DNA sequence: CCAAATAAGTGGAATAATCAACTATTCCAT
DNA sequence: ATGGAATAGTTGATTATTCCACTTATTTGG
């Protein structure tokens, strides 16, 4: 493994380190900004980023437990519990105790939740378009591969 | 610009979209997990992610205004105001009204803040090492270039 | 040079996230 | 079967963030 200037500048324990050359610093900034932009679009339709992530996950999974959603969204379980019940209050999801395991709470999208998904995707599309309009498919692929690899490394 | 399957699957307005193929979904997850890991390391030394970002920025800038820090860290100004004064209470930073512009508050690291920087960097180094140990310098470079490009696109 | 516009920051109420301690249920090894 | 460990989730106190209206200071166009 080649380890040169790039590595040193990116490594927080190296004297050559600086935020400007730190992958995690840039990542945090990017995601922070993405959340700001999404929030600005989602607020007018009564939605926000955490809710959108839950809805997205439930669209994939049909029926998921609170822990599963928390895990996939990387949000703490107790935060997710409260979020899910807020969303139930807003009729975006429904909850039910599992019939096979009395500890688990199964969460599903409601009709209203599915409608919200469509609305939110069109907003998310605007930002995606803006973010990636000049980036090649191959680069998107590379970017996602690296993102997933780093994620797995610290999982 | 080639626009094929990758693009469609990554685009929230496309029917082929799914979180699993969405760059922003993976990015949010990665940063969320990174923050979890950092928090776990930082909590024992009385620190957290927002503070670490402020300290890092002040190490780069010597003296910065609240707005500048908020901008660089992508945190709202009113949040930053409160964070800075919490940090001042903890003697990590000092604040002073600018002599040339009575509106602006200049923030600096204290000695204690500089010490905290060293401690925190060693923790950040552990996670960096874990995250990037099997990733080539060239890939780190590519990754950061793309991150910055996407950031600029939505700035 | 002054009024209007802009910029920086503050404060308080409302909302959300976190921590830690707790309940209820299930699993498992004897 | 049964008691201890593990899992899933909940709750309340605490802390942090957000929104938004407001103050104060500076800049700028006429």
Image (cartoon, coloured by chain):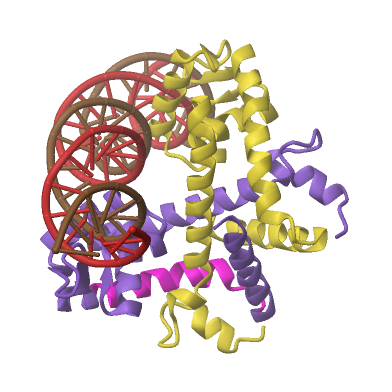
Chain colours: A purple, B yellow, C red, D brown
Which of the 4 quarters of the picture holds residue C27?
A: bottom left
Residue A52, magenta (yes or no): no
Tell which of A76 and B108 is nearer to you.
A76
Which of the 4 quarters of the picture holds residue A144?
A: bottom right
Q: Residue at x 40, y 65 (%)?
A: A72
**D29 in relation to B26, above or below:** above
**Place of residue B5 in the rendered image (x, y in percent of width and height, measured from the top left):** 56, 89
Is residue B132 found left or right of A100 in the rendered image? right
**B52 in relation to A132, above or below:** above
Residue A119, magenta (yes or no): yes
Q: Main secondary structure of the magenta part?
A: helix
**Place of residue B86 in the rendered image (x, y in percent of width and height, measured from the top left):** 42, 20
**Place of residue A131 in the rendered image (x, y in percent of width and height, measured from the top left):** 55, 66
Asked whether the viewer can see residue B110, the reply is no
Q: Residue at x 43, y 55 (%)?
A: A35
Q: Quadrant of the C terminus of chain A?
A: bottom right
Q: Which residues are magenta?
A: A116-136
Asked whether the viewer can see residue B129, the reply is yes
Tell which of C13 and A24 is nearer to you.
A24
**Place of residue A83 in the rendered image (x, y in percent of width and height, measured from the top left):** 24, 55
**C26 in relation to B2, above or below:** above
Q: Residue at x 68, y 40 (%)?
A: B125
């Amino acid at each position: 493994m080649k380890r040169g200037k790039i590595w040193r500048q990116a490594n927080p324990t190296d004297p050559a380190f600086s935020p400007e050359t730190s992958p995690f610093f840039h990542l945090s900034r990017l995601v922070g900004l993405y959340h700001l932009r999404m929030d600005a679009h989602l607020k007018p339709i009564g939605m926000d980023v955490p809710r959108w992530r839950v809805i997205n996950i439930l669209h994939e999974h049909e029926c998921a437990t609170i822990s599963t959603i928390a895990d996939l969204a990387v949000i703490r379980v107790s935060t997710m519990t409260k979020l899910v019940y807020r969303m139930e209050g807003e009729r975006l999801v429904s909850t039910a105790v599992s019939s096979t395991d009395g500890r688990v709470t199964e969460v599903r999208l409601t009709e209203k939740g599915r409608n919200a998904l469509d609305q939110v995707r069109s907003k998310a599309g605007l930002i995606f378009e803006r973010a990636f309009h000049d980036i090649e498919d191959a680069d998107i692929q590379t970017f996602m591969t690296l993102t997933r690899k780093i994620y797995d490394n610290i999982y």
